[in-house]
Amino acid sequence: MIFLELILQNFGPYCGRQVLNLRPDDRDSPPIILLGGMNGGGKTTLMDAIRLALYGHRAQCSTRNNLGYSEF
């Protein structure tokens, strides 16, 4: 599965609608996506969003133990 775009709507520190374009520039090489940022910048939250999108209420997220699925 190759993700081409990720859209977040009011998820964690991502207020409003945030669209991340994940399409590779070079069509001949395999897509590799690197995430970097300062502590507290939302990298783990972004991964939690992907886990929730794929696995729903069965997702094992970093802060999921503290919140119910509907609160995410």
Image (cartoon, rainbow, N blue to C red):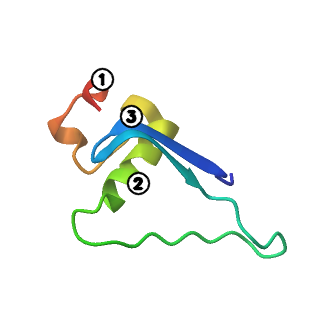
**Above or below, comparing residue 66 to residue 27 in the picture:** above
Crowd band around label 1 with a 10 angstrom C-alpha radius: few (<14), some (14–19), many (20+): few
Corner quadrant of residue 11: top left
Q: Residue beneath label 1, please?
A: 70
Q: Outermost residue, right direction?
A: 28
**Residue contact at pointers 2 and 3, CB within 8 angstroms:** no
Residue 48 falls left or right of residue 71 = right
Residue at point 43%, 32% (across, down) = 56
Q: Residue beneath label 3, please?
A: 58
Residue at point 74%, 72% (across, down) = 30
* C-alpha separation, residue under disc 2 versus residue under disc 3: 15 Å
Q: Amino acid at mark 3?
A: Arg
For the C terminus, the quadrant is top left
Q: Residue beneath label 2, please?
A: 47
Q: Earlier in the sequence, mark 2 or mark 1?
A: 2
Residue at point 62%, 72% (across, down) = 32
Q: Earlier in the sequence, mark 2 or mark 3?
A: 2
- On the image, the x and y values in percent for residue 1 come to 68, 51
- On the image, the x and y values in percent for residue 29 come to 78, 76
Which residue occupies the foreground of this view, 13 or 29? 13
* C-alpha separation, residue under disc 2 versus residue under disc 1: 18 Å
Q: Amino acid at mark 1?
A: Ser
Q: Amino acid at mark 2?
A: Met
Q: Outermost residue, top direction?
A: 70
Residue at point 24%, 40% (across, down) = 64
